[in-house]
Image (cartoon, rainbow, N blue to C red):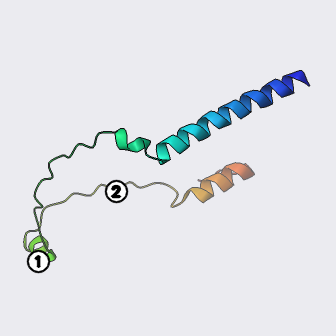
Amino acid sequence: MRILKRFLLTAAILIVAVAALAVYLLRGGFRRFDITPYPVSRAAFTNWNDVLAHPRDISLTTFQTPYPDGVRIAADSYKGKARA
Protein backbone atom coordinates (compact mmCIF):
# COMPACT_ATOMS: atom_id res chain seq x y z
CA MET A 1 0.00 0.00 0.00
CA ARG A 2 2.83 2.37 0.85
CA ILE A 3 4.57 1.66 -2.47
CA LEU A 4 1.35 2.39 -4.36
CA LYS A 5 0.95 5.75 -2.61
CA ARG A 6 4.55 6.67 -3.40
CA PHE A 7 4.06 5.68 -7.03
CA LEU A 8 0.86 7.71 -7.32
CA LEU A 9 2.53 10.73 -5.72
CA THR A 10 5.46 10.50 -8.15
CA ALA A 11 3.09 10.11 -11.11
CA ALA A 12 1.02 13.10 -9.97
CA ILE A 13 4.12 15.29 -9.60
CA LEU A 14 5.31 14.27 -13.07
CA ILE A 15 1.91 14.98 -14.62
CA VAL A 16 1.74 18.41 -12.98
CA ALA A 17 5.27 19.27 -14.17
CA VAL A 18 4.55 18.23 -17.76
CA ALA A 19 1.23 20.10 -17.74
CA ALA A 20 2.93 23.25 -16.40
CA LEU A 21 5.56 23.07 -19.13
CA ALA A 22 2.88 22.60 -21.80
CA VAL A 23 0.87 25.56 -20.50
CA TYR A 24 4.01 27.74 -20.39
CA LEU A 25 4.93 26.90 -23.98
CA LEU A 26 1.41 27.32 -25.30
CA ARG A 27 0.85 30.64 -23.53
CA GLY A 28 3.82 32.38 -25.11
CA GLY A 29 7.01 30.59 -24.23
CA PHE A 30 7.64 29.90 -27.91
CA ARG A 31 8.07 33.65 -28.50
CA ARG A 32 11.51 33.55 -26.93
CA PHE A 33 12.91 31.29 -29.65
CA ASP A 34 14.78 33.23 -32.30
CA ILE A 35 13.37 33.06 -35.81
CA THR A 36 16.09 33.27 -38.40
CA PRO A 37 15.14 33.81 -42.02
CA TYR A 38 17.11 31.99 -44.65
CA PRO A 39 17.58 33.04 -48.27
CA VAL A 40 15.17 31.31 -50.63
CA SER A 41 16.54 30.65 -54.08
CA ARG A 42 14.62 31.85 -57.09
CA ALA A 43 12.35 29.25 -58.68
CA ALA A 44 13.71 27.73 -61.88
CA PHE A 45 10.27 27.58 -63.48
CA THR A 46 7.29 29.82 -62.91
CA ASN A 47 4.57 27.92 -64.80
CA TRP A 48 3.87 24.55 -66.43
CA ASN A 49 4.67 25.86 -69.92
CA ASP A 50 8.25 26.54 -68.80
CA VAL A 51 8.49 23.09 -67.22
CA LEU A 52 7.21 21.27 -70.30
CA ALA A 53 9.33 23.37 -72.67
CA HIS A 54 12.55 22.37 -70.87
CA PRO A 55 12.40 18.63 -70.10
CA ARG A 56 15.18 17.07 -68.05
CA ASP A 57 16.53 13.54 -68.11
CA ILE A 58 15.47 11.33 -65.26
CA SER A 59 16.40 7.83 -64.22
CA LEU A 60 14.26 5.22 -62.52
CA THR A 61 15.36 2.19 -60.57
CA THR A 62 12.90 -0.64 -60.11
CA PHE A 63 13.14 -3.55 -57.72
CA GLN A 64 11.54 -6.90 -58.40
CA THR A 65 10.41 -8.75 -55.31
CA PRO A 66 8.86 -12.21 -55.16
CA TYR A 67 5.65 -10.91 -53.57
CA PRO A 68 3.65 -7.90 -54.72
CA ASP A 69 2.47 -7.18 -51.18
CA GLY A 70 3.54 -8.08 -47.67
CA VAL A 71 0.23 -9.73 -46.79
CA ARG A 72 1.16 -13.03 -48.40
CA ILE A 73 4.46 -13.16 -46.57
CA ALA A 74 2.81 -12.56 -43.20
CA ALA A 75 -0.03 -15.01 -43.89
CA ASP A 76 2.31 -17.74 -45.17
CA SER A 77 4.70 -17.44 -42.27
CA TYR A 78 1.80 -17.53 -39.82
CA LYS A 79 0.35 -20.70 -41.33
CA GLY A 80 3.75 -22.33 -41.49
CA LYS A 81 3.66 -22.50 -45.28
CA ALA A 82 6.42 -21.35 -47.58
CA ARG A 83 5.77 -20.14 -51.11
CA ALA A 84 8.12 -21.22 -53.83
State the image coordinates of residue 56 (x, y, percent, origin top left).
12, 63
Q: Nearer the viewer, residue 75 or 25?
A: 25
Residue at figure coordinates x 58%, y 38% from the top left:
20
Secondary structure of residue under mark 1:
helix
The answer to whether any part of residue 83 appears in the image is no
Q: Mark 1, residues whose alpha carbon is within 10 Å: few (<14), some, or many (≥20)?
A: few
Residue 35 is drawn in which quadrant? top left
Residue 59 is drawn in which quadrant? bottom left
Which quarter of the rendered picture does the N terminus lie within? top right
Q: Is residue 60 left or right of residue 32?
A: left
Checking the image for residue 61, the label placed there is none
State the image coordinates of residue 54 (x, y, percent, origin top left).
7, 69
Checking the image for residue 49, the label placed there is 1
13 is higher (above) or lower (below) than 38 = above
Q: Mark 2, residues whose alpha carbon is within 10 Å: few (<14), some, or many (≥20)?
A: few
The amino acid at mark 1 is Asn
The amino acid at mark 2 is Thr
Checking the image for residue 62, the label placed there is 2
